[in-house]
Image (cartoon, coloured by chain):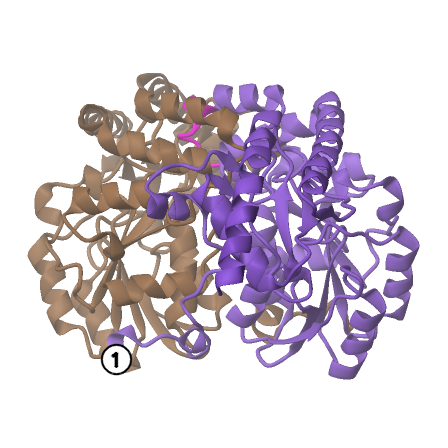
Chain colours: A purple, B brown
Amino acid sequence: MTRLRFAPIPATLPATVPFTGPEALERQRGTPFVARLGANENGFGPSPHAVEAMMRAAPEIWKYADPDSHDLRHALAAHHGVAPDNIMIGEGIDGLLGLLVRLTLAPGETVVTSDGAYPTFNYHVAGFGGLLHKVPYRDDAEDPEALVAAARENFARLVYLANPDNPMGSWHPAPRITAMLDQMPQGSLLVLDEAYAEFAPDEAIPQIDPQDDRVIRFRTFSKAYGMAGARVGYAIGPSELIAGFDRIRNHFGMNRMAQIGALAALQDHEWLTETRRQVAASRDRIADIARANGMTALPSATNFVAVDCGADGAFARRLLAELAVLGIFARMPAVAPMDRCIRISCGPARDLDAFAEALPTALQRAQDASRDA
Amino acid sequence: MTRLRFAPIPATLPATVPFTGPEALERQRGTPFVARLGANENGFGPSPHAVEAMMRAAPEIWKYADPDSHDLRHALAAHHGVAPDNIMIGEGIDGLLGLLVRLTLAPGETVVTSDGAYPTFNYHVAGFGGLLHKVPYRDDAEDPEALVAAARENFARLVYLANPDNPMGSWHPAPRITAMLDQMPQGSLLVLDEAYAEFAPDEAIPQIDPQDDRVIRFRTFSKAYGMAGARVGYAIGPSELIAGFDRIRNHFGMNRMAQIGALAALQDHEWLTETRRQVAASRDRIADIARANGMTALPSATNFVAVDCGADGAFARRLLAELAVLGIFARMPAVAPMDRCIRISCGPARDLDAFAEALPTALQRAQDASRDA
């Protein structure tokens, strides 16, 4: 078996994946879900202009995409008021996080994150031989001061913070992020994941000099722009760091329709405004449904809502399983005490109707199972 | 500048890229190319069924793709008569080659390839700290026996062979590949890049037990299926090696329309047959154009033709530059003596008409410049 020997780091890695896709669960169930509310996808969908642009681009798919993503990169630079060389476009934030870890982290170096925060980032850190130091959430939110303190103590190379947070939907005001930046130890880089930024109040989004060498930010077309399946994310950061991606990335890795669709989506401000409105209404609706069932929705600055089930993680897991039986795909935080919650993505009325209809039965069954357990 | 310190391997890498995209050249020119014949794209385009499937999938782009690529993987398994766990789907062969190198190669280990073969593979080897040992081409073809000998001498972990070859279009009959396999040293894995397999004669494609642990093969939807911009490639190999990709890949990295389009393309046998016919005719046409201009087309088992300009690399580079001035995007081999050629991708008549029209002028100018030099 010498030929199939893996390299030293992969040899130590488990074959686990960060998330099971809903399609795999559907294959197990033998039938599709009624409502897809588990992956924080945006069921309100992409701008019709983006759809139209992708459809027009389909016959031209024989061409490789522009490896520089020139047009999209320049449009994003204008959108954010930064230079084009402050922007790196890649195959979703997931892909870019992997590249960032590879670009900056030597095997054996330490990374600080929150216990229960984004698993795919942890997957990449482990995948490149990094050591993870996890800091507890405080009051259902990531804890900037504790993250910085842990970075100091552990000589962390990278510090991950999502603002707004996934999976809880909580957020910190901009001054708390900039204060965190000012406290970052020399040699530590803040990985500021702003995947949900477009849903957050303006006060959550700090103004940061793009050349500030203490931080790299990540944005995506997967959430507010409704294009998760397209795989377009981008980083905003100092030009010297951004240029580093060119040393290692898969230059011809972008899908051509995705590039073109993302550009059209970015230009459709009305659709984004309308999406925000619908998502806000959807959050309220989820809170109403939770309340009607004796549960509590947590405040959210994202397109999902963490719903406190009022019991422990075992109960929430049971509830999630019963919801799945009834055709509702949802997920939940992995770590206590946040795992008292289930996490429901915002979506169109028909999906939330299905959730509202299934929830009382699922709750009853989960309660019965808990009594029997 | 401690924060922007790169990890040890990326710190040593140049900022160069494997290829400059035609769009970057067009931005320099200030005007689009008339004929895009440089990247071995397939200008005959994808199956209309694939286009239709992608267009239908566009409004559903708010959903992440199935991270298992289940439907496409099972269809490919049936197509090749292998098990689904012998197949790994990824973001083009380029993306998969990067993952393979990461999965199997420890920093400092050696990889054997041919001097002048696919630069993107070399880019990934360097990107993960591998050492490249390059074997010369022999008679405009990669040299299986020399590659194996070099693998033995250098304790190579990976041996790269493209069959048919890019950039020369040459190919080896299947028995020569299986003989190579039988000679592979213990501990060496053959990376058999069959990106152009669908254009090759049947005799070029060896029957290999998918569980054979001496080899991993790569195929793509970028060439014969005309979907380069979609980014769908796949590996065929022993299940234990294939499963290893799950330890490190970007699980949610596939574009959803690309998955759906590739499945439709795979099922359209007629379109593939027609594409092969058109490509064969296009190869003949390129040979005719070359002959009419006193040049020699080399035999090709791919969708491109290496055209021997009858002089040295400097002349071929000049000719390429003059063609570009006249709106013809082409590329050429990087290494002598193959760099006496320019490489022309097959394409629709209008593109080859433009090439035929531009070539005499470009040749004249290149000859004049050579005399002046």
The N terminus of chain B lies in which quarter of the figure?
bottom right
Judge by depth and name the residue closer to the eye, B178 or A206: A206
Disc 1 packing (10 Å; few <14; some 14–19; many ≥20) = few
Judge by depth and name the residue closer to the eye, B146 or B151: B151
Of all chains, the one bearing label 1 is A
Percent coordinates x, y for residue B185 in the rendering: 20, 77
Whether residue B50 is visible here, answered yes or no, is yes
In the image, residue A65 lies in the stretch drawn in magenta: yes
Write down the quadrant of residue B329 in the picture.
Answer: top left
Q: What residue sits 17% from the left and 49% below the top?
A: B171
Amino acid type of the residue tagged 1 in the rendering: Thr
Percent coordinates x, y for residue B97 in the rendering: 38, 58
Q: Give the range drawn in magenta.
A: A58-66
Please give the residue where the numbered disc 1 appears in the rendered image: A2
- In the rendered view, does B111 fall on the left or right side of A60? left
Q: Is residue B303 above or below residue B161?
A: above
Task: Say which element carries label 1.
Answer: helix
Q: What residue sits 22% from the left and 54% below the top?
A: B141
Q: What residue sits 61% from the left and 40% below the top?
A: A222
Write down the quadrant of residue A158 in the picture.
Answer: bottom right
- In the rendered view, does B192 fall on the left or right side of A246? left
Judge by depth and name the residue closer to the eye, B88 or B271: B88
In the image, residue A284 lies in the stretch drawn in magenta: no
